[in-house]
Image: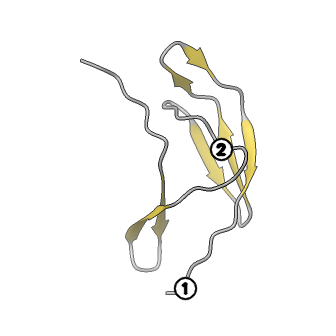
Amino acid sequence: MKTVALNDLHLLNLKNKTWMSLAIFGEELPQQRWGHTLVASSKKLLIFGGMHLKNYYDSSVYEVQIDHDNS
């Protein structure tokens, strides 16, 4: 069985309980990983650890801007 780490991001709208895929742009993007923890505030994503194949990642903080309608 082959292990694959994806580099995608999804947002859950808690009001209507629907998922949305987000396009990610920027100079420094998080590396694809699994086994991590992600915590979000209104403007930042904090990613704690995780790994990809044989590499372990440090914790990182990313600034995000999410444009959305308020539905």
Q: Residue at x 69, y 67 (%)?
A: 65
Judging by the rendered image, the residue that carries numbered circle 2 is 29
The amino acid on which the numbered mark 2 sits, given as a three-letter code, is Leu
Q: Which residue is drawn at 40% across and 79% down?
A: 16
Q: Residue at x 37, y 71 (%)?
A: 18
Label 2 close to label 1 by CB (< 8 Å): no
**Relative horizontal placement of residue 44, taking residue 50 as reference (left or right):** right
Q: Quadrant of residue 20?
A: bottom left
**Relative horizontal placement of residue 61, taking residue 37 as reference (left or right):** right
Judging by the rendered image, the residue that carries numbered circle 1 is 69
Q: Which residue is drawn at 74% across and 64% down?
A: 43
Q: Position of residue 45 (x, y in %)?
A: 68, 52
Judging from the image, the colouring scheme is secondary structure
Relative to 36, is 64 above or below? below
Q: Position of residue 1 (x, y in %)?
A: 24, 17
Q: In which quarter of the image is residue 36?
A: top right
Number of marks drawn: 2
The amino acid on which the numbered mark 1 sits, given as a three-letter code, is Asp
Q: Is mark 2 on a helix, strand or loop?
A: loop
Going from N to C along the chain, the mark reached first, 2 or 1, is 2
Relative to 14, is 50 above or below? above
Relative to 40, is 68 above or below? below
Farthest top residue? 54
Depth check, mark 2 against mark 1: the one in front is 2
Q: Is mark 1 on a helix, strand or loop?
A: loop
